């Protein structure tokens, strides 16, 4: 069984992917882990990817796809895998479809964890840091006792630019799964949408139920 896990940043994909992998015994293939492994082992693809990562740029599709094809060609992935962070667009999805078809497989399930934008912004934004001791707070999930003041040392709390709501909103817009990608799997009849605004356990149960 081959499964694609989709969702915007802050939807909990990483956590849910780990839970599903344990419950189903599927190999968990994370794009981030794949990049790190290749860079650490100094493979040719890893060296190439690093040149983009060091600049803060996205690794091109052709490099990512070659890494993925190598990964799914290993023995542990031949019977099935769960893809987390891949595909990011239709070009990658089509390359994955072709690679799996070549070995007699296909994507059986595409699971989309859906969360409203305002909830994602609340989850990803709102982080505050103490200038003095570095203690972290979250204005909704872990607020300080007194606004703007660190509980631990009394230092001033500040917010980094990339934790501010408007910056988070702009990042979300860039990193959401494209509509065309979602439609690709909807058209293939394998898409299931899961409400990601419930508890971790409830979301995990729904994902497992969708997998049958």
Image (spheres, rainbow, N blue to C red):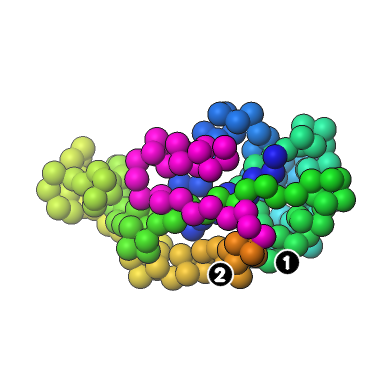
Query: Does the magenta segment cover residue 142?
Result: no
Q: Give the residue drawn at x 46%, y 50%.
A: 194
| Residue 18: percent from left, percent from top | 55, 35
Q: Give the residue drawn at x 32%, y 63%.
A: 118
Residue density around tag 2, few if under 14, some if 14–19, many if 20 or more, within 10 Å: few
Q: Quadrant of the N terminus?
A: top right
| Residue 143: percent from left, percent from top | 21, 46
Q: Give the residue drawn at x 50%, y 38%.
A: 209
Quadrant of the rendered image containing residue 76: top right
Q: Is residue 93 visible?
A: yes
Quick check: 162 above or below 19? below
Q: Which mark is residue 117?
A: none
Viewer-nearest of discs 2 and 1: 2
Query: Does the magenta segment cover residue 197?
Result: yes
Q: Residue furthest left?
A: 146
Magenta stretch in the rendered image: 188-212
SS for dot 2 = helix
Q: Earlier in the sequence, mark 2 or mark 1?
A: 1
Camera-side residue: 159 or 189?
Answer: 189
Q: Is residue 195 left or right of residue 100?
A: left
| Residue 170: percent from left, percent from top | 44, 70
Quick check: 74 above or below 163? above
Q: Residue furthest right?
A: 102
Residue density around tag 1, few if under 14, some if 14–19, many if 20 or more, within 10 Å: some
Quick check: 191 above or below 151? below
Q: Give the residue drawn at x 35%, y 50%.
A: 197
Quick check: 154 above or below 158? above
Task: Provide the residue designation for mark 1.
Answer: 91
Q: Is residue 23 left or right of residue 117?
A: right
Task: Provide the residue designation for mark 2.
Answer: 179
Q: Is residue 15 visible?
A: no
């Amino acid at each position: 069984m081959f499964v694609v896990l989709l969702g915007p940043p802050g939807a909990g994909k990483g956590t849910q992917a780990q839970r599903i992998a344990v419950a189903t015994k599927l190999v968990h293939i994370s794009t981030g882990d794949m990049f790190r492994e290749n860079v650490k082992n100094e493979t040719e693809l890893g060296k190439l990817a690093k040149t983009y990562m060091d600049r803060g740029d996205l690794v091109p599709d052709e490099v990512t796809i070659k890494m993925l094809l190598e990964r799914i060609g290993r023995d542990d992935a031949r019977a099935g895998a769960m893809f987390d962070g891949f595909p990011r667009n239709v070009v990658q999805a089509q390359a994955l479809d072709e690679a799996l078809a070549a070995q007699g497989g296909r994507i059986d399930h595409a699971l989309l964890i859906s969360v409203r934008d305002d909830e994602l912004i609340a989850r990803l934004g709102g982080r505050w840091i103490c200038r003095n001791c570095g203690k972290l707070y979250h204005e909704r999930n872990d607020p300080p006792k007194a606004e703007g003041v660190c509980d631990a040392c009394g230092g001033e709390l500040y917010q980094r630019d990339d934790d501010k709501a408007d910056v988070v909103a702009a990042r979300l817009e860039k990193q959401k799964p494209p509509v065309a990608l979602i439609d690709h799997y909807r058209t293939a009849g394998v898409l299931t949408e899961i409400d990601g605004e419930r508890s971790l356990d409830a979301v995990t149960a729904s994902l497992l139920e969708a997998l049958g």
